[in-house]
Amino acid sequence: VKRMVGVLPDDLRLFERLTGEELLIYVGLLRRLDRASVLSRSEQLLEVLGLTGAAHDLVADYSTGMRKKVALAAALLHSPSVLILDEPFESVDPVSSKVIVEVLQHYRSSGGTIVFSSHVMDTVERLCDHVAIISSGEVVRSGSVQDLTQSSTVRLEDIFIGAVGGSASHVNESLEWLGQS
């Protein structure tokens, strides 16, 4: 199963005393890739994800967004069949976010399957074919994005809020004093 799956967890636990390049080499060798493939793929992923200039810096010195990108590179390095991503766009700048979207679209068009969790419904709506809305550990709604939204006027965010029983209607009443000087 480990050969088939790549994982990007939300709570990144990386080897911080390694450089970004060393981390990828370690992960690649651990995944039993040959050294030449590891070096080539690591270099390509570091370049595509904008980490070439930081390849020789310790992971401990990386920003949160850089750590997210090197962890994504580690998850992709062995070219898994399934990629599981937990909040892949959290703490990532807009340019890097766009690059990650393109990498994921390329991965998907090459036959890979992506399962990811996100609280940003615009991103989910833009990137996903199928969605499962989970509340208290149970799937409360699922289906294609198109089927769930039923038209271009209903947003996935509204479907999500309705499915989990949330509401923001009390905000205006509770904070009527806000902005009145």
Image: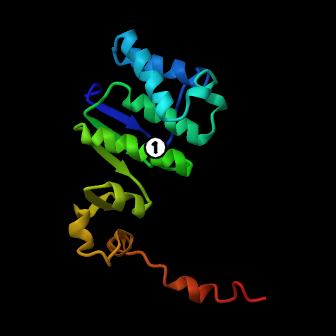
Name the foreground residue: 124 vs 126.
126
Residue 179 percent location from the top left of the image: 71, 85
**Residue at image location 57% in from the left, 42% down from the top:** 65
69 is higher (above) or lower (below) than 152: above
**Three-letter code for the amino acid on which mark 1 is drawn:** Val
Asked if residue 24 can be seen in this view, the reply is yes
**Residue at image location 30% in from the left, 75% down from the top:** 152
Residue 125 percent location from the top left of the image: 34, 62
Residue reaching furthest right? 181
Q: How dense is the environment of label 1, judged by Cα within 10 Å: few (below 14), some, or many (20 and up)?
A: some
82 is higher (above) or lower (below) than 93: above
Element carrying mark 1: helix
User: What colouring method underlies this structural image?
Assistant: rainbow
**Residue at image location 29% in from the left, 30% down from the top:** 80
Q: Quadrant of the C terminus?
A: bottom right
Residue 108 percent location from the top left of the image: 28, 42
**Residue at image location 34% in from the left, 33% down from the top:** 6
Instruction: Report whether 21 appears left or right of 119.
Output: right
Asked if residue 136 can be seen in this view, the reply is no
Across the whole image, how many numbered discs are drawn on residues? 1
Q: Quadrant of the N terminus?
A: top left
Residue for badge 1: 99
Residue 87 percent location from the top left of the image: 45, 49
Instruction: Report whether 76 appears left or right of 81.
Output: right
Instruction: Name the image quarter holding residue 163.
Output: bottom left
